[in-house]
Image: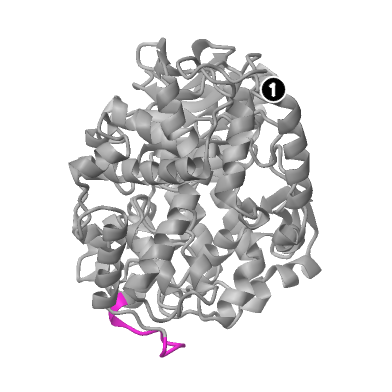
Amino acid sequence: MKPQPSNSTPPGYHGRCLRVDVGTGRATHIELPADVLRRFLGGSGLGTWLLLREGAAIIDPLAADAPLAFVFSPLVGSPLTTSAKFAVVSKSPLTQRINDSLASSTFAIAGKKTGCDAIVITGRAEQLSVLVIDDGGVRLESAAELAGQTCGDTELRLRERFGSDLSFAVIGPAGERQVRYATISHDGRHAGRGGSGAVLGAKNIKAIAVRGTQRCDWAFTGKLTAFAKELSARSFGPATAKYRELGTASNLLVFNRLHALPTRNFQSGSFEAAVQLAPETLTLAREKTRASCAACTIGCEHIYEVKKQGTVERGQSVRLEYENLFALGPLCAIDNPDVVLQASRLCDDLGLDTISTGGTIAFAMECVERGLLDEPWLRFGDGEALLRAIDLIGRREGLGDRLAEGSRRLAEGIGSNSIDFAAQVKGLELPGYEPRALQTMALGFAVGTRGADHNRSGAYEADFSDLVDRRRLTPAAARHAIETEDKAALMDSLILCKFLRGVFSDFYVEAAEMLRLVTGWNTTADELRMTAKRIVNAKKLFNIRAGWNAVEDTLPARLLECELADDSQAALSRQQLQAAVAAYNTGRGWSASGSIPAEHLATLGLADV
């Protein structure tokens, strides 16, 4: 078909957003102008625009009127590999800053078929409910019988009740109890970080069910199909081989060798028992299967059987990722792989982000070790204590009620300068990259709008190259941090899997071609570079409106005052980080302290938001 006029809805889009107030049951469609779609695309970008439009930055994320957006993209439903993804965008109850969590599943495809490019939920239902969106029709049904049910059991019961032709996004007990890092689950996968599950739980919504028949056209169907076939073939090549063979956990031993594997609450960068937890070892000791996300040709998922006291629990298995392994293993000094797998499965059942769960528990373990927290049972290396703590968090009972608030709030309650060794940025617990051993990544963590995040900043790519000295941060590293952050913002808005990064010879050129074939826009690589910068700026603008200030763009004192115990060359000073942050801000066109000049917003096309 021919490209559409610029003032009409382009192929790949429906051109509207469904806004549902679950307190009143009122549903309305909001037009999404073509120029907004072109400027923000979908996923994280369009979600940020929607939140700015809703004024979410100044609303408590757990308040009834706080918006939560499920956002699709122009590529969803297309034949392009890894395109069956959606973003959940809200203000985070953990950080009070912008939060966008991405996930892959059939929910993205079914959700877009309801005839909208995004679903925005506001209000609070009178009782625990299921929000059903069926081909654009909206209704609320009671979920009273699902109260307290695990994520998996909730989906199973919903399929029995509504049928298997609907797709479901659900919360577990942690979301119902508004644990600040609760997830939204779908097909066993999670929109994990930042607590979107708590936002949905605060709305008394246990699940969202979607089904539809409304498909989008593509501008150049034949050429798009040919492009997709060629991209799929490349995605099954050497650039993604390690993910197929060992999964994301393949990085564990490499990180351990480089002293980049955070251990015992970031007290060291290597774990003596790392080989016991490595996928190379796990594969020899237990059954494993491989799987792929919806519409994906890479197949990085590695699903392991779960053993308890040496016996395989019937029907129990878990998807194992590097971050699960790190956060529930070395970070808490747990060397028993069975315990780590059990802990990961328990987090999945309860609907808990594994990074924040492990990070908060590891911090509490060190507080106990230092005599700052009177919970003598919670010790590093104690597997039973780890499992007990996770269960308490999910139920918000005893110490679990405090742990459910995250490490920053826990440190503020404990006092005694414990915030100095709470491994978080803006309230978001650090993922499994030791910042002193990977110092370009340290910069990426410090400036991240979502907080410390390895998915919104790929700065570690520079650390693993010959572009920088990974153990000596300089202002020159800012350029690499900006480049990888822009690239991630574009991938998260199109939306495509990050594991495709190595497949593209020139990502911006090929992304422009994909978008042209889908929408008919004559998009260029330079336009998409500007789009990526616009999206990063929009997120920063949200944070500024939410109360951000420059002192947030830093790392915990431990990481800036102490060299790594097992690598004396890995040391990062406060002055080094501050100089790099200032260079990053200047490189973004902001002031050195991080504020955004009005003329810069206008240049990026953000003056109207």
The magenta-colored residue range is 560-569
Q: Which residue is mark 1?
A: 160
Residue lying at 65% horizontally and 37% vertically, measured from the top left: 187
Along the line of sight, the residue nearer the viewer: 118 or 20 = 118
* Three-letter code, disc 1: Glu
Tell me the crowding category of disc 1: few under 14, some 14 to 19, or many 20 or more residues within 10 angstroms, Cα based.
few
Residue 500 lies, with reference to residue 383, above or below; the image says above
Q: Residue furthest bottom?
A: 568
Main secondary structure type of the part rendered in magenta: loop
User: From what the image shows, is residue 597 above or below residue 30?
Assistant: below
Residue 360 visible in this rendered orientation of the protein:
no
| Side of 144 relative to 608 (left or right) | right
Relative image position of residue 540 (x, y in whole percent) = 30, 46
Q: Is residue 304 left or right of residue 500?
A: right
**Residue in the foreground of this view, choosing between 487 and 56:** 487
Q: Quadrant of the N terminus?
A: top right
Where is residue 535 drawn, in percent x and y?
Answer: 39, 41
Residue drawn at the location 54% of the way across and 81% of the way down: 258
Quadrant where the C terminus is found in the figure: top left
Can residue 425 be seen by looking at this rendering? yes
Where is residue 387 shown, x and y percent of the image? Answer: 53, 59
Q: Magenta stretch: residue 208 in it?
A: no
Q: Name the quadrant containing residue 66.
A: top left
In the image shown, does 437 or 390 lie closer to the viewer? 437
Task: Tell me the SS state at disc 1.
Answer: helix
**x and y percentages locating residue 186 in the rendered image:** 60, 36
Q: On screen, 196 above or below 461?
A: above
Q: Quadrant of residue 553?
A: bottom left
Q: How many marks?
A: 1
